[in-house]
């Protein structure tokens, strides 16, 4: 009886190693979760844009002795771009930021502003953020987990 001694791995051993590598790769991809990281980066950018818009509007309000800019309509949501410097009642030196995902350089900014008496609300222009669905400034697929900022003068 001759014993044959092969060098190498058996098919079972190779399949087990490939299975272990696949499980480890799946765990790493789940831990990294690039989609969630991109979403968090976009939301951080949105918060920064919201703060910038509020600061510009309140700066203009202070410059005008407590009167809100004329580009804001009391009780109605408007797109932030209506306050751009080039608009009729715009704020000098202001250009509305564009949403990192949905905004484009030519269209709506995808940020909405509402003035109710002395309360200013700035939010991503999405139904998730509480902007009325009948408004023309709604931008789809933005504003996840970013509800907006309300400030009272």
Image (spheres, rainbow, N blue to C red):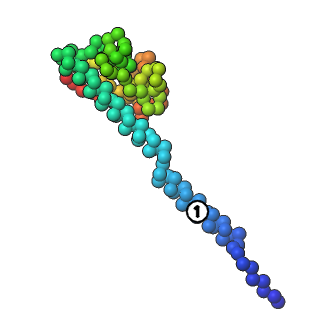
Q: Residue furthest front?
A: 93
SS for callout 1: helix
Is residue 5 depicted above or below 150 in this figure?
A: below
Q: Picture coordinates of residue 81 (x, y %)?
A: 38, 19
**For this rendering, which residue is in front, 15 or 61?**
61
Based on the displayed image, in which of its 4 quarters is residue 92 positioned? top left
**For this rendering, which residue is in front, 10 or 99?**
99
Is residue 46 depicted above or below 87 in this figure?
A: below
Q: Could you tell me if residue 129 is visible in this image?
A: yes
Q: Could you tell me if residue 119 is visible in this image?
A: no
For the point 54% across and 60% down, the residue is 24
Q: Which residue lies furthest to the bottom in this view?
A: 1
For the point 35% across and 30% down, the residue is 49
For the point 47% across and 51% down, the residue is 32
- In the displayed structure image, the side of residue 64 where residue 114 appears, left or right: right
- In the displayed structure image, the side of residue 100 where residue 69 appears, left or right: left
Based on the displayed image, in which of its 4 quarters is residue 78 positioned? top left
Based on the displayed image, in which of its 4 quarters is residue 152 positioned? top left
Q: Residue furthest right?
A: 1
Q: Picture coordinates of residue 110 (x, y %)?
A: 42, 24
Please identify the quadrant where the N terminus is shown: bottom right
Label 1 neighbour load within 10 Å: few <14, some 14-19, many 20+: few
For the point 36% across and 18% down, the residue is 84
Q: Picture coordinates of residue 102 (x, y %)?
A: 47, 28
Is residue 48 depicted above or below 60 in this figure?
A: below
Please identify the quadrant where the C terminus is shown: top left
Q: Picture coordinates of residue 71 (x, y %)?
A: 31, 14
Q: Which residue lies furthest to the top in this view?
A: 88
Q: Mark 1 = which residue?
A: 21
Total labels drawn? 1
């Amino acid at each position: 009886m001759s014993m044959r001694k092969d060098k190498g791995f058996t098919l079972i051993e190779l399949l087990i190693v490939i299975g272990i590598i696949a499980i480890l790769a799946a765990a790493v991809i789940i831990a990294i979760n690039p989609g969630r990281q991109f979403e968090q980066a976009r939301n951080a950018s949105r918060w920064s844009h919201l703060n910038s818009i509020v600061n510009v509007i309140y700066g203009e309000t202070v410059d005008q002795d407590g009167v809100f800019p004329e580009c804001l309509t009391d009780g109605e949501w408007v797109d932030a771009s209506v306050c751009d410097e080039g608009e009729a009642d715009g704020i000098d030196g202001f250009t509305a930021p564009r949403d990192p995902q949905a905004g484009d350089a030519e269209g709506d900014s995808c940020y909405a502003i509402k003035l109710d008496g002395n309360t200013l609300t700035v939010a991503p222009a999405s139904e998730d953020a509480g902007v009325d669905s009948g408004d023309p400034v709604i931008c789809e697929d933005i504003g996840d987990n970013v509800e907006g900022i309300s400030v009272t003068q």
